[in-house]
């Protein structure tokens, strides 16, 4: 095989790099910037191919064996490919270990709109959600042992002789490391959380079933009110437009 043919055949390597890049980033295919990621993979594949050519020339210059230049070109490309596969394998292993140790923790905080430190993000869930969630985490030896699948809450005003405060009733539904679907009920009052129900089965709990129905009704009411407000706004804009005409 001539050196020129070896270089032509080495064009298979960028195709392999591109395929590896797509496999690694495939789960992000629905993200808005995925096209930019694909463009980066294409450019990166070309750069790696050029690195392969550089190492090929370097190996050929070191060994200086006439007639074996084509093998040196493949050796250079293979060296870059092996390094690339090693880095990809290391990244996959590191991501797997990170998910194993912190995956559920990060998911739960994101699920409740909390930041990495468990603090309430501005303009998201209020402080009582963090208080209740911290109480739930305290029941587990490892905060990564459960993964939230649902959350809803209710408020009940409690009137005292001198002031009025609000009782927040929180329901957390989650999946444990044993793949069990469970729920907990927590009361938050005056900045303090009290566990009322822990690790109960939502399929057999009448209280959870009724609370879930009430939550759905509240969501439907909010959607209905939003729809009515939007309709009133559209009618007001239409009347205003007719007056101008």
Image (cartoon, rainbow, N blue to C red):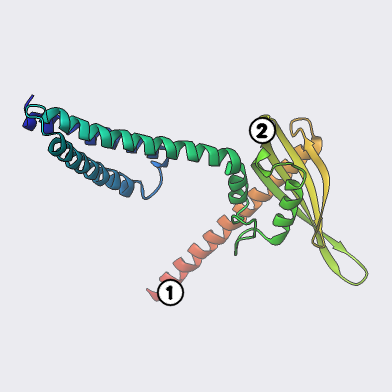
Q: Which quadrant holds the C terminus?
A: bottom left
* For the residues bearing labels 1 and 2, Cβ distance under 8 angstroms: no
Q: Quadrant of residue 161?
A: bottom right
Residue 171 placement, left or right of 31: right
Residue 32: percent from left, percent from top: 38, 49
Q: Which residue was labeled with disc 2?
A: 177
Taking the view exactly as shown, the residue that stands out farthest to the top is: 1
Q: Residue at x 6, y 32 (%)?
A: 4
Q: Which quadrant holds the N terminus?
A: top left
Q: Earlier in the sequence, mark 1 or mark 2?
A: 2
Distance of mark 1 from mark 2, alpha carbons? 63 Å
Q: Quadrant of residue 162?
A: bottom right
Q: Does dot 1 land on a helix, a strand or a loop? A: helix
Q: Nearer the viewer, mark 1 or mark 2?
A: 2
Residue 103: percent from left, percent from top: 57, 42
Q: Residue at x 59, y 45 (%)?
A: 107
Q: Which mark is residue 243?
A: 1
Q: Which mark is residue 98?
A: none
Residue 160 placement, left or right of 176: right
Residue 108 placement, left or right of 92: right
- Between 111 and 98, the residue placed more toward the observer is 98
- Label 1: few (<14), some (14–19) or many (≥20) C-alpha neighbours in 10 Å: few
Regarding residue 236, the answer to whether it shows in the image is yes
Regarding residue 146, the answer to whether it shows in the image is no
- Label 2: few (<14), some (14–19) or many (≥20) C-alpha neighbours in 10 Å: few
Residue 228: percent from left, percent from top: 58, 58
Q: Quadrant of residue 64?
A: top left
Taking the view exactly as shown, the residue that stands out farthest to the bottom is: 244
Q: Does dot 2 land on a helix, a strand or a loop? A: loop
């Amino acid at each position: 095989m001539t050196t020129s043919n070896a270089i032509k055949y080495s064009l298979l390597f960028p195709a392999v790099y591109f395929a590896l890049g797509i496999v690694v980033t495939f789960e992000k295919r629905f993200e808005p910037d995925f096209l930019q990621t694909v463009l980066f993979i294409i450019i990166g594949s070309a750069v790696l191919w050029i690195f392969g050519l550089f190492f090929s020339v370097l190996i050929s210059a070191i060994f200086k064996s006439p007639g074996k230049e084509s093998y040196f070109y493949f050796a250079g490309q293979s060296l870059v490919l092996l390094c690339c596969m090693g880095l990809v394998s290391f990244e996959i292993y590191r991501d797997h270990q990170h998910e194993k140790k912190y995956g559920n923790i990060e998911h739960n905080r994101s699920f409740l709109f909390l930041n990495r430190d468990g603090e309430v993000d501005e303009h998201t869930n209020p402080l009582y959600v963090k208080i209740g969630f911290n109480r739930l985490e305290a029941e587990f030896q490892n905060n990564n042992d459960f993964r939230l699948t649902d959350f809803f809450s209710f408020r009940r005003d409690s009137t005292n002789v001198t002031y009025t405060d609000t009782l927040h009733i929180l329901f957390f539904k989650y999946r444990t490391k044993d793949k069990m679907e469970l729920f907990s009920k927590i009361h938050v009052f005056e900045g303090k959380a009290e566990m009322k129900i822990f690790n109960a089965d939502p399929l057999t709990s009448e209280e959870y079933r009724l609370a879930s129905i009430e939550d759905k009704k509240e969501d439907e009411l909010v959607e209905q009110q939003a729809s009515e407000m939007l309709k009133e706004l559209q009618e007001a804009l239409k009347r205003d437009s007719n007056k101008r005409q």
